[in-house]
C-alpha cells in the first residue's frame, strides 16, 4: 500500500512536469496554429542550459529557471522564423515536416555539441525527505510542484492581466480579426511561441533535476508526452493540457508498477491513443476556429 | 409523380444556433427544384445534410424511399446522388479529364489485384473510363479543355467541369450549390439552358441559387429558407409574389418600398 | 487540334521512357561485372533496399497523402518475421519473404484502423507511437525475439542449391525485389485504385462526394505500403545476418522519411532518387558521420522552403503548394480568375 502511495506521489510530481511541458505546447499550438515536433528538443535545450548555468553560477534554482527559460525562448525565435513564418498560408504538412527537420537538426547538433552520453546533475537541491517511513515527499518533488504551480499562475496573470497576454489570446481565437484590430499578429505569434518554448525549457530543467541526469536524446520521449497530454484539451486549451499532464504522470507511474519500467514511454502513447479514440477533439470546449 | 428526395422535419443545431429548423421538402422525379434564401439561411447546410456530409440533429432524409439519414457521403453518392460545392471542389492539379475519371469511380470495378495483373476487368475499366470521360466532356462542351489543368481554367468553366464530374456518376439526382455564382448574364443563360437540357435527358436537379432571374427562369418549384426555416414553397410566380419572401429579402422598412416585387 | 500529332508525340515519349528504363536495368544487371568490389556492392544493396523502403513510404505519404512517419516499424516487422520463421521453424527464405510482407501489412491495417477520423498530424503521431511500440515489443519480448541481444546467425537464402550470402550475389535478390516493386507499383498507381488514392490526397471531401470509399482505400494504401516495407525487412534480415531492435528506431524512420522528402513525393522516381542521394551522402560523409544527420535535417528544411514536393516529386499536387490559400481564394471569389 505504501508503495502505491509513493508511486502516486511520484506520479503527481512527474505529472506536474508533464503538465508544464503540455502547457508550453498548448500555448505554442494555440497561438501559432500549427503543430510542432520541436517541443521535445526545446525541452532538452532548456535542460542543458540549466546544466551549464548550474555549473557556472552554482546550484541556485532561480538561476536555472532563468537560464532554461531564456535559452528556450531564444530557440523559439529561430524555430518561428524557420518553420512557421513562411508557412502560415500553406498546407499544414509543410510546416510540420519543417519542424521534423528542425527537431532532427537540434537533436543532432546537441549530440555533437554536448556529446552523446548521459550527464549527471546531482544534488541541485538538498536531499531532504518529509514523511513517515517510506511514504512521504522529497524536497525535490515539492520544489518541482511548487515551480510548476508558480509558473502556471504567472502565465494566468500574463494572459488575463497584461496587454500582451490579451493580444495573445485574441490571436489564438481569430488571427484575421486580431489583425484587423491592429494587433501585430506576426510579433504576437512569435512571442506566444517563445513563451511556450520557454516554459518547455523550464520543464526540461525540472526533468534534469528530478532524474538527476540529462542526455541529448531526451527530447523525443519528452515531446511525445507533451503532445499526448495536451491532446486531452484539444491541443490548445491550457488548463486541460495541465490536467492531461498530471493524469499522464499518475497513469505512467502506476502503470509501471504492473509492468516493466522500460514500458514507461509506452503509456504516453497508449494514453494518447485512448484520448484520440474516445474523443478526438479533446475534452475541453474548443477555443476558436482552429481546424 | 414519384418523390425522389424527401426531407421530413429536418433540424440541425450547432450548439445554440438553429441552422436548419424543421424543414420539410419533397422533390419529384424530373423536377428542377430551386432552394433560395438570404445569405446564412441554411441552404448549404441543408444540402450537406441531404448528401450525407452532415448529420441532422433530428429528422430524416429519404432518397427514392430509402432512409439515408445516417449513411456516409460516399454510400449516398453510390446510390445516385451527385453534388457540386459552393466553393468549387475541383481537383485543382488534375486535368479536366482526370477530374471526370474520378467521377467514374463508382461505375468501375477494378481492384488491387486486377490492376497488378492487368486483368480483363482492369482493361475494360480503363477503356470505359477513358471513353465515357471523353463522351461526358463532349456532351458538356468541354472537349477542347480535356488535358488542361483544372485550376488553369476560368471560373465559369471550372463550374462546368464540376458539373460534368458530377454527371459522371450517372446520378438519379444532381444537387448544384450556387452553380452560376460569379457568371455573367450570358453564361448564366447558357447554363440555365444546359440544366433544362439535363432535365429533358431525365435528370432531376436541385439548385441552390441567389440569382433570381436564373431561378425564376429555370426552376419548376422553389423553396424559400430564412433563418433555417421554410417560409414559402411553390411555383416561381407564387414565390415571387409572396409577402414573406419579399420581406425576407428586402425588409419591411421605408427603403424597401414596402415590399418591392 | 487533331488527334494524330498528339498521339505520335506521346508515343515517342513513352517509348523513350521504356528504352531508358531498359538501359538502366541492363546497367544495373551488369553492374557487378563492372565493379565487383564488395564494398561498392554493399552500397548498391543498401540503395536498392532503401529504394523499396522509401518507395513504399511514398505510397502512403506521397500518393494518398496520409502522414506516416513510423515506417521503421513495418521494416522491423518484416525483418523479425523472416528471421524468426527461418530460425524457429526452419522456413525457407523464399517462403518467409512474402510472409514477412503479409505480417507487416496486417500490422499496417491495425495501425490505420483507429485513425480514419484523425487529422493528418494525429495520424503522424499515432504512426510514430506504433513504430516505437513495435520496437519496444521486440525489445522486451525476450522469449520470442531475444530482446536487446537481437537475432543472430540468420540463415542465408538458398537458390538451386547455391547459398546466397555474399553482397555480390545478394545484390541480385535486392535488384529483383526493387524491380518487382516498381513494376507492380507502377501498375497499381496507374489504375482506378491509384486514382482513388490521389483523389483522397487532393481533396478527401470531394472524393467522398464522388463515391470513393475513403476509409477502405486509405486502409488499402497503408497495407500496400507496409507490405513492401515488410518485404524489404524480410530481405534485409538474412543479408545482414543479424537484427536487433535498435536498428529500427525512430532515427531509422526519419532516415527513410528524409529520402522521400528530398528525392520527391508522389512520383515513382522520387524516392528512388532520394535513396541514391541519401545513401551516397552517407558513404561520402563517413569520416564526419555525425554531421550527416545535420545535413539531412538542413536538406529537409531547405526542401520545405524551396520545393516542398522534393527534387523529382509531383508538381501538380497540393504537396507542392507553399501558398495554398491565396490561390484558392482567387479562384473562389465571384468574378475572379481569368475573365
Image (cartoon, rainbow, N blue to C red):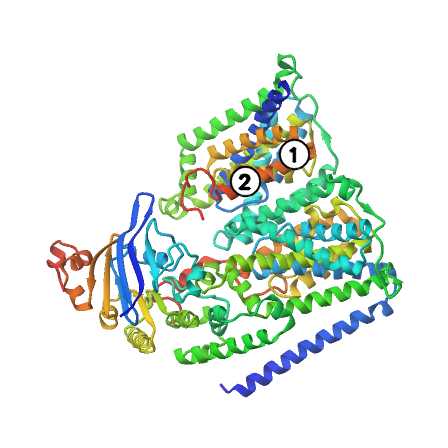
Q: How far from the left and from the top, in percent, is residue B78?
A: 44, 65
Q: Residues within 10 Å of mark 1 (few under 14, many from 20)?
A: some
Q: Secondary structure at mark 1?
A: helix
Residue C31 appears in which quarter of the rendering? bottom right
Say which chain tag 2 marks: A
Q: How far from the left and from the top, in percent, is residue A266?
A: 63, 38
Q: How far from the left and from the top, in percent, is residue C201?
A: 53, 60
Instruction: State the residue at coordinates (75%, 35%).
Output: A117
Residue at the spot of label 1: A264
Q: Residues within 10 Å of mark 2 (few under 14, many from 20)?
A: some
Question: Foreground mark, 2 or 1?
Answer: 2
Any part of residue B110 in sight: yes
Say which chain tag 1 marks: A
Residue at the spot of label 2: A274
Q: Earlier in the sequence, mark 2 or mark 1?
A: 1
Q: How far from the left and from the top, in percent, is residue A268?
A: 60, 37
Residue B257: which numbered mark, if any?
none
Instruction: State the residue at coordinates (38%, 58%).
Output: B68
The front one of C247 and A22 is C247
Q: Report the Cα–Cα distance between label 2 and label 1.
A: 16 Å
A267 to the left or right of A108: left
Q: Secondary structure at mark 2?
A: helix
Total count of labels: 2
What quarter of the picture does the C terminus of chain C occupy?
bottom left
Farthest-out residue, top? A132
Any part of residue C65 in sight: no
Question: Do marks 2 and 1 share a subunit?
Answer: yes
Amino acid at each position: 500500500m505504501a508503495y502505491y502511495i509513493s508511486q502516486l506521489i511520484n506520479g503527481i510530481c512527474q505529472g506536474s512536469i508533464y503538465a508544464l511541458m503540455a502547457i508550453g505546447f498548448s500555448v505554442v499550438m494555440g497561438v501559432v496554429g500549427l503543430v510542432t515536433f520541436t517541443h521535445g528538443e526545446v525541452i532538452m535545450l532548456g535542460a542543458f542550459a540549466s546544466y551549464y548555468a548550474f555549473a557556472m553560477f552554482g546550484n541556485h534554482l532561480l538561476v536555472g529557471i532563468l537560464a532554461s527559460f531564456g535559452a528556450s525562448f531564444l530557440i523559439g525565435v529561430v524555430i518561428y522564423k524557420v518553420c512557421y513564418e513562411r508557412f502560415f498560408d500553406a498546407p499544414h504538412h509543410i510546416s510540420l515536416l519543417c519542424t521534423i527537420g528542425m527537431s532532427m537538426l537540434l537533436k543532432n547538433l546537441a549530440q555533437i555539441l554536448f556529446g552523446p552520453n548521459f550527464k549527471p546533475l546531482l544534488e541541485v537541491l538538498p536531499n531532504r525527505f518529509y514523511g513517515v517511513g517510506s511514504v512521504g515527499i522529497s524536497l525535490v518533488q515539492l520544489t518541482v510542484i511548487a515551480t510548476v504551480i508558480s509558473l502556471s499562475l504567472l502565465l494566468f496573470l500574463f494572459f488575463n492581466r497584461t496587454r500582451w497576454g490579451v493580444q495573445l489570446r485574441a490571436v489564438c481565437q481569430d488571427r484575421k480579426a486580431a489583425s484587423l484590430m491592429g494587433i501585430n499578429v506576426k510579433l504576437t505569434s512569435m512571442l506566444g511561441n517563445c513563451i511556450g518554448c520557454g516554459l518547455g525549457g523550464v520543464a526540461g530543467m525540472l526533468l534534469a533535476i528530478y532524474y538527476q541526469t540529462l542526455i541529448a536524446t531526451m527530447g523525443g520521449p519528452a515531446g511525445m508526452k507533451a503532445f499526448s497530454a495536451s491532446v486531452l484539451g484539444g491541443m490548445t486549451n491550457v488548463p486541460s493540457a495541465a490536467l492531461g499532464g498530471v493524469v499522464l504522470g499518475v497513469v505512467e507511474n502506476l502503470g509501471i508498477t504492473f509492468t516493466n519500467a522500460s514500458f514507461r514511454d509506452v503509456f504516453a502513447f497508449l494514453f494518447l491513443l485512448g484520448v484520440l479514440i474516445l474523443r478526438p477533439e479533446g475534452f475541453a470546449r474548443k477555443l476558436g476556429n482552429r481546424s | 409523380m414519384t418523390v425522389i428526395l424527401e426531407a421530413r422535419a429536418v433540424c440541425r443545431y450547432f450548439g445554440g444556433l438553429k441552422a436548419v429548423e424543421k424543414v420539410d421538402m419533397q422533390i419529384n422525379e424530373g423536377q428542377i427544384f430551386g432552394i433560395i434564401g438570404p445569405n446564412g439561411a441554411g441552404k448549404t447546410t441543408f444540402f450537406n445534410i441531404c448528401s450525407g456530409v452532415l448529420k441532422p440533429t433530428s429528422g430524416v432524409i429519404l432518397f427514392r424511399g430509402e432512409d439515408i439519414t445516417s449513411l456516409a457521403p460516399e454510400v449516398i453518392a453510390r446510390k445516385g446522388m451527385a453534388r457540386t460545392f459552393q466553393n468549387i471542389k475541383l481537383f485543382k492539379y488534375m486535368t479536366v479529364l482526370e477530374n471526370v475519371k474520378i467521377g467514374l469511380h463508382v461505375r468501375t470495378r477494378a481492384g488491387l489485384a486486377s490492376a497488378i495483373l492487368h486483368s480483363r476487368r482492369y482493361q475494360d475499366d480503363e477503356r470505359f473510363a477513358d471513353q465515357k470521360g471523353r463522351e461526358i466532356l463532349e456532351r458538356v462542351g468541354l472537349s477542347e479543355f480535356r488535358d488542361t489543368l483544372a485550376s488553369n481554367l476560368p471560373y465559369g468553366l471550372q463550374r462546368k467541369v464540376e458539373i460534368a464530374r458530377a454527371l459522371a456518376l450517372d446520378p438519379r439526382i444532381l444537387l448544384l450549390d450556387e452553380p452560376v455564382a460569379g457568371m455573367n448574364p450570358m453564361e448564366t443563360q447558357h447554363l440555365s439552358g444546359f440544366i433544362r437540357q439535363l432535365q429533358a435527358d431525365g435528370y432531376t436537379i436541385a439548385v441552390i441559387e441567389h440569382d433570381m432571374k436564373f431561378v425564376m427562369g429555370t426552376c419548376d418549384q422553389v423553396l424559400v429558407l430564412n433563418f433555417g426555416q421554410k417560409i414559402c414553397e411553390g411555383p416561381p410566380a407564387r414565390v415571387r409574389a409572396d409577402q414573406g419572401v419579399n420581406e425576407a429579402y428586402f425588409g419591411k422598412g421605408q427603403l424597401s418600398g414596402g415590399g418591392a416585387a | 487540334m487533331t488527334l494524330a500529332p498528339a498521339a505520335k508525340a506521346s508515343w515517342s515519349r513513352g517509348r523513350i521512357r521504356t528504352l531508358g528504363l531498359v538501359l538502366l536495368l541492363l546497367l544495373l544487371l551488369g553492374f557487378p561485372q563492372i565493379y565487383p568490389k564488395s564494398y561498392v556492392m554493399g552500397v548498391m544493396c543498401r540503395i536498392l533496399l532503401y529504394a523499396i523502403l522509401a518507395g513504399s513510404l511514398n505510397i502512403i505519404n506521397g500518393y494518398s497523402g496520409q502522414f506516416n512517419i513510423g515506417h521503421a516499424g513495418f521494416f522491423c516487422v518484416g525483418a523479425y518475421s523472416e528471421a524468426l520463421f527461418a530460425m524457429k521453424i526452419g522456413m525457407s527464405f523464399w517462403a518467409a519473404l512474402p510472409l514477412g510482407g503479409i505480417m507487416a501489412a496486417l500490422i499496417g491495417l491495425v495501425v490505420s484502423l483507429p485513425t480514419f477520423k484523425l487529422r493528418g498530424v494525429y495520424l503522424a503521431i499515432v504512426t510514430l507511437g506504433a513504430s516505437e511500440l513495435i520496437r519496444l515489443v521486440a525489445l522486451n519480448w525476450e522469449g520470442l525475439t531475444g530482446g536487446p541481444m537481437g537475432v543472430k546467425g540468420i540463415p542465408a537464402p538458398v537458390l538451386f542449391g547455391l547459398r546466397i550470402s555474399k553482397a555480390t550475389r545478394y545484390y541480385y535478390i535486392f535488384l529483383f525485389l526493387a524491380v518487382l516493386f516498381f513494376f507492380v507499383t507502377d501498375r497499381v498507381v496507374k489504375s482506378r485504385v491509384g486514382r482513388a488514392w490521389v483523389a483522397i490526397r487532393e481533396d478527401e471531401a470531394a472524393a467522398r462526394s464522388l463515391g470513393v470509399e475513403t476509409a477502405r482505400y486509405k486502409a488499402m494504401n497503408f497495407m500496400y505500403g507496409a507490405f513492401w516495407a515488410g518485404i524489404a525487412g524480410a530481405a534485409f534480415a538474412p543479408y545482414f545476418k543479424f537484427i536487433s531492435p535498435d536498428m529500427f528506431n525512430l532515427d531509422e524512420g526519419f532516415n527513410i522519411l528524409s529520402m522521400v522528402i528530398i528525392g520527391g513525393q508522389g512520383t515513382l522516381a522520387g524516392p528512388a532518387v532520394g535513396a541514391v542521394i541519401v545513401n551516397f551522402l552517407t558513404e561520402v560523409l563517413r569520416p564526419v558521420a555525425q554531421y550527416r544527420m545535420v545535413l539531412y535535417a538542413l536538406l529537409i528544411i531547405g526542401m520545405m522552403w524551396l520545393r516542398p514536393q522534393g527534387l523529382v516529386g509531383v508538381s501538380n499536387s497540393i504537396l507542392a503548394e507553399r501558398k495554398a490559400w491565396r490561390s484558392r481564394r482567387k479562384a473562389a471569389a465571384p468574378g475572379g480568375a481569368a475573365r
